[in-house]
Image (cartoon, coloured by chain):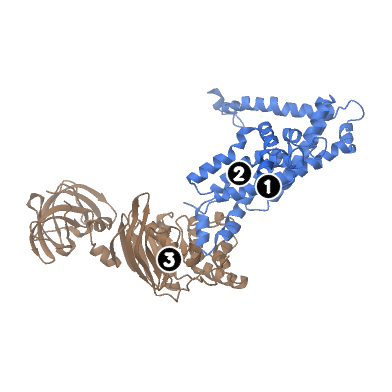
Amino acid sequence: MVMPNTAGRPVEKNEFKQLRLEGVSRQFGGANALDQLSLTIERGEFIALLGPSGCGKSTALNCMAGLLPLSGGSIWLDQQRIDTLPPEKRGFGMVFQNYALFPHLTVSRNVGFGLKMRGVPAAEIDKRVAAALDTVQLQGHADKLPGQLSGGQQQRVAIARAIVIEPPLILMDEPLSNLDAKLRIEMRSEIRRIHRAQGCSTVYVTHDQDEALAMADRVVVMKLGVVQQVGTPQEVFARPATLDVARFMGYRNVLPARVLRSDGASVTVEGAGGVRLAGTAMQALAAGASVMVAVRPDEIAIAEGEHAFPGTVETAEYGGREWLLQVRTAFEDLLYVRSSRAVTPGDSVMLAAAPDRVLVYAGES
Amino acid sequence: MAGLATPASAAPHARPPLDPAVMLVAPAAAVMVMFFVYPFAYGLLLSFQPAQGGVLQNYIHFFQTRDLWQTIGNTLQLALPATLINVGFALAIAYATRVKSPYQRLLSTLLVVPLTLGTVLIAEGMLTYFGPRGWLAQALHWLNLYEGSIRLTHNYWGVLISLVITGFPFAYLLILSYITGIDPALPRAAATLGADGWNRFRYIYLPLLTPGLVMAFCLSFVQAFSVFPSAVLLGSPAGTTRVIAIAAYEAAFEQYDYSLASAVAMIMGLAQLAIVAAALGLRRLFYRGPVTGGKG
């Protein structure tokens, strides 16, 4: 049996510059789980694959790991083509959603498993395992079995197991989704801290946009196997490229309208009941085109303004710092508005939004 | 229901009244007692009441008569190899077919068919196919693979082959269920850590399967040890395949010495118990917990 540290030696983490996915496709039962995914990951980057269930993010991760074969395209590590290699030859670390800790091995044996497979001498294994357990702050648990640990501790063992082999790339498949909310937030900063300390490139799959925004250098938003947008968290949050991305990123108010005047990026649209809004065009739009207008609930204010329009508050939900209102306007759907002012249902209000926060997309006809 | 109300004057830690639903166990318990506990106890007592001599005369007679105590060795010589072969092959084939596919279903069905045939039918088939003039001998001669005579029936090999044919399906199904119970994420994780196929089997599957393999061994062994019709039809019941069940049969139905027969049966049970206890003792050395990889 060829061991990984002869001809097919896994790449050390400081040796590679780029992981490239070129036109990666995967079909499953006739449907496209992944459709022509192309992506370049630079050394040291933290990339988040974000999207709802079924968007192909886990499929992409498993294809990168070698656990799923590609139906088309290729994956390159610098000049070396790796999609033809089995997972044991790729040398990537992976953290699974349900941790996949070996139940019959102690924590230190779990963490040291990858090093053992690489033929690292026992003394060095002990040293590196101890260092990895230090990093994830699990000193003192080395001789326990996974079954004796809590969810958060198991999570950290899984991370230690992936980082101890010092791989060029770490793949994380929704590692925090099985933890409670408080632990999730703690582990989020932990993972970020470990990433900064270790410097391994990381691909992180999640359906939680807060996680992606907080942790990633770049976010890849996916839907139904197709990449919708690649950008920094700021770009994806403030300037979602498509209506789908906008909806996913929390632009809850999506209103149909028609373009009255178009002047480059600035557009004036008219919606139901003659309501006029000034907005920013996200695509090329001509006058008269039917469009969809997306606005975040926290970016509509109760205020006067040139394009303010009236509404009646239907429900007001108290959230501690602010109120979440549902407002009946001339539009068909209720508008979601976050307001720091206390209002009561039945109040009449005027709503306004800044033009650069009103995003206008070509309509779905 | 009157039974559920505890009077206020009862002692502070009085036993709660018996849940009437427990009585539902009664029919099964009665069957157990009637068909297992009572006959066993009856047989045990009977074995201590020989026609002549003291209480242990049957047992002494057994261990003094070569014709009798040799049967333990004969039976072990058949049962142990047959069980090891069955468990070994079942492990290999179950491991190879652990991924669900139509191929797996077809293979499973074929391998399990002998379960439906019964020992006597298999013995009959083997006499026809594996006998000196049977199909196998003729095929080998025709292919010029072997010119000598085939001696696979009426001897040790016939019984061994029949034990493998009848015992394999059971071991296979049992081990297959153990293997498919192992979380498939575990070998995947091992693969990402650099373990190739052999290492995944050696470090992940085998340790997690060992307790199950020991159980499969125990159950298959007990089945094989009680071999009887195969030993008579396919073996040489007066010679190398004189198994302990034959000794009990002869004592009961040829010599009409039910006391001796019961004693032989008890000794047979003890021999099986000893091997099973040893195997279960070995099992304690291994990890016996759940075979999944964590929460969620």
Mark 1 lies on a secondary structure that is helix
User: In front here: B230 or A47?
Assistant: B230
Q: Is residue A226 at least partly visible in the picture?
A: yes
For the residues bearing labels 1 and 2, Cβ distance under 8 angstroms: no
The chain containing the residue under callout 3 comes to A
User: In front here: A24 or A151?
Assistant: A24
**The residue under label 1 is which amino acid type?**
Ile
The chain containing the residue under callout 1 comes to B
Q: Where is residue B46? Give x, y as percent.
A: 82, 27
Can you tell which of label 3 and label 2 is closer to the viewer? Answer: 2
Numbered label attached to residue B172:
2
Mark 3 — residue?
A: A191
Q: Is residue A334 above or below residue A357?
A: above
Q: Is residue A300 above or below residue B246?
A: below
The residues bearing labels 3 and 1 have C-alpha atoms spaced at a distance of: 50 Å
Residue B142 in the figure: left or right of residue A202: right
Mark 1 — residue?
A: B85
Q: Is residue B14 at least partly visible in the picture?
A: no
